[in-house]
Image: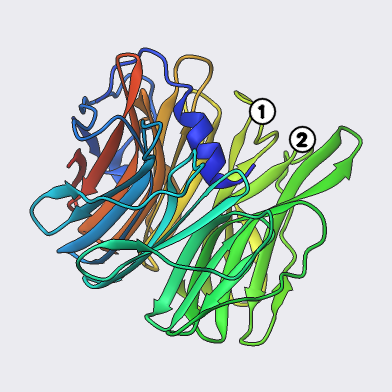
Amino acid sequence: MGKTSAIAAASALFLGATVAAAVPAAANATATATAQPAITASPVVNGSLSAVSASSSRDAWAVGTQTSATAPNLAEHWNGATWTRVPVPTLRGQYFGLGSIADISPADAWATGRSYDLAQLVHWNGKAWSRVPIPSIGAHGLGAIGAASASDIWAVGSGASLHWNGKTWARVPVPVSGLHDLNSVKVLSPSNAWAVGSVTVASSFGDITANLILHWNGKTWTRIPSPAPLDAKYGDFLNGITAVSAGNIWAVGCTDGCLVQGAFNPQIEHWNGKTWKQVAAPATPYGIYTLNSVAAASAGDAWAVGGGGPGTALSGAIAHWNGGTWKLSPGLRGTQLYGVTALSTGDAWAVGVAQSGATGRALILHWNGKSWARS
């Protein structure tokens, strides 16, 4: 199961809970079960948001899935003052919506999505979204997209990777055999890109997932060893990746039975320019959660978001890196967070879904340097 499909499935798990108004700074927060400020679910649309990307403080996109039998694609745009829904074309037979977004400029953005084995790629030209033809990738989906510039973009997913050179999309081989998913990609330059996800491997417990990390050197993708988490015997995978520089990169995900509801723990990995190493993830009062996305504004300022919790107490999670340790804010009851982006120490966005009655509502949070609040 790729990240897009997993997000859509997780959105259906919400049960009754109270959702909080602002989330205090992670650096000052204590992870207690009682600290629950209240925010309200987004009134914009029934559904969930999977990813967010911003080219500036006045240009950001959030994409996901809306509750619709005929038009599941959901895209919302930030112009510096308000969020507005923008129509996106839908593929015939599509079930899930959009899972990833790369916002390059006000007149250039790309989004990908998949519905099981159905791939889609759409482009924003400053006026409208349109479907873009892609090379045949067989029965594969596209789960993530990342850009270094308007002429250096990667789209990756289930057994596939595509590259945009400014004129055309071309398929590039991935050196992984067997069932695998690439859930996130970070492009630093034409000769430096990273993609993370999972690969299915055999174990004494049957088939499980293992961390998958690939690096692009300008010519080929190469698999890079990933340190196994301490509690990885039931499977693990990586959901998100971000980079401060070529020698300072973060990846996040889950471990200890990621695909089993109510049985997962977060994992955080760091690249120092030579090797990947596991970094301790902060503990929570409810014990279990996963991290879905990570974004860094600087070497001493990064955010990772996700969620989890036992049974009906599903809670969103926001973790902050202050340059020395990861610290966790109190969980947001009744929410799950799937995407995050950071422009500066005082400007970041996180998106996901908030339970509202019997349905889920798209959720957007903004960080202003002091607190998280619903936008």
Which residue is at the far right? Answer: 204
Under circle 2, the secondary element is loop
Q: Nearer the viewer, residue 291 or 147?
A: 147
Picture quarter with the N terminus: top right
Observer able to see residue 241:
no
Callouts 1 and 2 close, C-beta under 8 Å: yes
Q: Quadrant of the C terminus?
A: top left
At x 30% / y 61%, what residue is drawn?
129
Give the residue number, with chain letter if any, for mark 2: 234
Q: Position of residue 38 (x, y in %)?
A: 21, 25
- Amino acid tagged 2: Tyr
Q: Above or below — where is 66 with respect to 172?
A: above
Q: Report how many numbered discs are placed on residues in the image.
A: 2
Q: Is residue 297 visible from the viewing direction of this image?
A: yes
Give the CA separation, mark 1 to mark 2: 9 Å
Q: Position of residue 6 (x, y in %)?
A: 56, 38
Kindly indicate the quadrant of the structure image that contains residue 221. Answer: bottom right
- Name the outermost residue toward the front: 92
Horizontally, is 17 left or right of 153 in the view? left
Q: Earlier in the sequence, mark 1 or mark 2?
A: 2
Which-is-in-front pick, marks 1 and 2? 1
Which amino acid, mark 1? Answer: Val
Residue topped by disc 1: 260
Q: Quadrant of residue 333?
A: top left
Q: Position of residue 76 (x, y in %)?
A: 24, 49
Q: Is 370 on the left-hand or right-hand side of 210?
A: left
Query: Relative to residue 165, is residue 121 depicted above or below?
Result: above
Question: How many C-alpha atoms fall within 10 Å of the one at disc 2: few (<14), some, or many (≥20)?
Answer: many
